[in-house]
Amino acid sequence: MSEAGQGHRYFLARHRLADLIDVLRGAGGRARTVIGPTVEQGAIVYAEIDTAADLPVGWRDEQAPGHYRLRREGDERAFAYAVGPTAWKRHLFPPARVRMEVAAEPGADGTRFEPTQPAASATVLLGARGCELAAMRVQDRVFRGGPYVDDHYADARDAAFVVAVQCTHPASTCFCTSMRSGPGVEAGYDLRLTEIADGFVVEAGTDAGGEVLVSLRLDPADEERAGEAHAAVAACAETVTHRNRGVDPIRARDLDMYPEHPRWDEVAARCLACTNCTMVCPTCFCSRDVQQSVLARPDGTVERQWDSCFTAEFAAVAGGSFRSRIRDRYRQWLTHKFSTWWPQFGTPGCVGCGRCIVWCPVEIDVREEIAAIGTSAPESDAQDGGERRGDVDLGPQALTTSPGGVPEPPPRTGTVERVTTETSDTVTLRVRTPPGLEAQPGQFVLAAVPRVGAPPISVSRLEPGTLELTVRSVGPATAALCRLGPGDPLGLAGAYGRGWPIEAARGNDVIVVAGGIGLAPLRPVIDAVLADRDSYGDVSVYVGARTPDDMIYSAEIGTWEQRRDVTAARIVDRAGPDWLGPVGVVTQLFADTAREAASTVAFVCGPERMMQASVDALVDSGMRAESIWLTTERHMECGVGLCGHCQLGPYFVCRDGPVFTAAELGPYLGVEGI
Amino acid sequence: MEQESGEVITPAHALQAVRLGAGLGEATREKLARVGQILVRGAGAVLFREGEKTPYLGVVISGRVGIRTYVAGRGDVTLSTVEAGDIFGWSVLVPPSRAHATVWAVTDVTVLGFPAESLRRVLAADPDLAAAVYQHALSALGRRITSTRLQMLDLFGSPRTTEPVRPPGALSRRLADVRRGAATEEPTS
């Protein structure tokens, strides 16, 4: 065994490749499914293989922007290609999987949300390239590196035996050396193969890999073969480096500094938003949860499917999409890959495999785009990017995760106790919370209605054993929530997100600015402050609404107005004949009051444009942006930072927010397309 | 006019207490106050009507004044309100000095009014005073335009607007500020 340990090179003659596959399929008495490269529909894809004959022996790939062709070379080489359209994520994070079974039978316990349990079978990933192993490490960070993990991905990853193949035949679209991900394979493999003229130089990276080599009874690779293997990888690296001299991923880290670069418009004019690049990308991880049901049955499933930030629906909330233009979506994708991935996960989101270039039907080449935007920013748009310089490291050490997160929890069933009609389209549900659900002011829950969906709803009141959710009917899911009555079951997942820093506000003057239903997430702040009134300085509550009839918690606002220890005022955009209060925008209520910057904390919630006006007014009155807290809305599917939908610049709103300071959100607040 | 305390409000006192007067030197303020008049109106009273010659520039001393217009089928629609300290009747400063809306007392109000002719005369005689009054009026108008735009967006009716809200380049500048660790200016107070 020790002879086959790590660091020793062995020679596998070409005719014994079949033996290797046999051993892989049954090594150690375990039956493994071998997934490897094979030719299907004119491309080399990863699929289940039975024998060495299934490998793409004698095939070469020709790859260029928007171009992929296979050519039969006729030799015996099995791995003389770069990468095909399928990435390993198809097997580790499949395009669709059932995430939950949802029961919706009558009775107290009739509504249940049961997560499917991971049950990955032992699998061999045969033919993984350096860039692909880097992609796995990147996805490890996404799916296993946070407080919540995708346990199906983790299970599939743990069940995988990786046979890496070092690249010797790069495509013109490869830029792995720029991203430091290849063509060699440094770690993360059980076995490492390098193809040479008469076979393979093989090394074990793990004990499990060593066991396979022992079973094969291989001879050590002689100096000549070892040298041939080393030279082939080195030549490949030189070729890739030479072709990509202008590709600078460090400089590309600053891509998000140029959101108004004209190049975004130029590339958007070509981009079809077809989603191909995200589908073939080995690191793209965005997903959506789709409700599946049969009309005649009350139960159903929730299926997690790949999603793409290039679709119009991806960033949609009720009333519109935050990225309505293709320009916005391309910018989001490219800046995420090269810029904002860094603060989220500590690495770039690109590994240089070139798939997005090859499979783009209009030949958009990310290498050209990052070079054009990163090096030719117009003067007015230019920033000093020097301060963010660092080094790309997609190596195993940099990407080691320390698993410790918990699986994404399913909703637990609560019961509606009371429904209060707030306005013509808004109700407040008082819900008896299921055991274990704890929430802080400013956090949100996913409120799940079987077969309909689970929209994120801010908690609008917290009391022992119950919480309140104020819901505006703006779409099918919220409409279903608004139709619930006393006694109805309701799924609740969470509570999630960063809440309001109420404790930190102690001793300070407190200003609460709310617009429309934005008062809902702020009401727990007001509750908490009034419950401990002496711990705070002056307390002011300003509420704006469309009309007097659209004002939620109207009677409660009246009680705040009555208090001598609270300054409370409300204003409407449109007055009715009976309205004798102020008419205008909410900033009119407080813009003229000077603030003590060091001792004032503001909490603001409403439409983004209103929040922006409020922040401007508060800053103009002397406040610091760091002391102004906002809560913001984005499309959310998972609530725990795994689905990718709620990105706002470097943030995941669900995980890093929804409460942010104005200093954090300032550059992005109310900006179209971010 | 007497306050509840029994103290008589004079135009000079009233002007001193509001932003318009606070920005003026004492002598200038007195000059302006001399043409001012204290007006008291009960809730519901119309101060002046849309289409009429604007009779005076007003400053709300107490109470709430409404700006409204008549829309056939909808009746009188209050577009905005003016609170204590703010001005109304700015059209008196600009020919043809016609009121663009009806001004009415939403609550009982006390108003410091500067009649049109007297005001024009005193402003024509003192360019510094004129500059101060015009600047104040322009500032109030700017705030009102901004508010009106936000109201027009109907933000609470629709969850969001699709209009860009920052001019090109502004985002980049703010990004740069944040990256440099200077997201906000030093406090001004």
Image (cartoon, coloured by chain):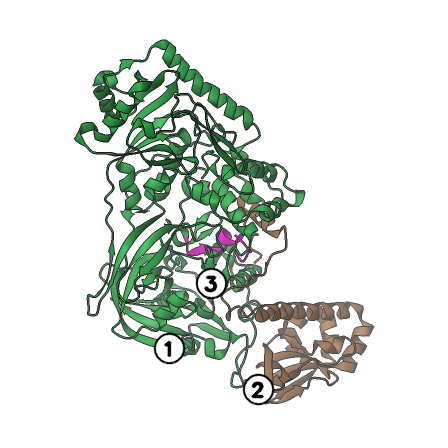
Q: Label 2, label 3: how many angstroms apart (C-alpha)?
A: 32 Å
Letter of the chain in brown: B
Chain letter belonging to callout 3: A
Chain letter belonging to callout 1: A
Q: Residue furthest left?
A: A29
- Residue at the image point whose x is 50% and y is 53% from the top: A665
What kind of residue is marked 1? Answer: Thr
Q: Residue furthest top?
A: A223
Q: Can you identify the residue that label 1 sits on?
A: A421
Residue B8 seen in this snapshot: no
Mark seen at residue A604: 3
Discs 2/3, front: 3
Residue nearest the observer in this picture, A516 or A499:
A516
Q: Position of residue A613 (x, y in %)?
A: 55, 63
Q: Label 1, label 2: how many angstroms apart (C-alpha)?
A: 34 Å
Letter of the chain in green: A
Q: Label 1, label 3: how many angstroms apart (C-alpha)?
A: 24 Å
- Residue at the image point whose x is 46% and y is 38% from the top: A348
Q: Do callouts 1 and 3 mark residues in contact (Cβ within 8 Å)?
A: no
Q: Position of residue A668 (x, y in %)?
A: 52, 53
Quarter-of-image position of residue A90: top left
Q: Which residues are magenta?
A: A657-674
Residue A667 falls inside the magenta stretch = yes
Q: Can you identify the residue that label 2 sits on?
A: B108
What kind of residue is marked 2? Answer: Asp
Quarter-of-image position of residue A107: bottom left
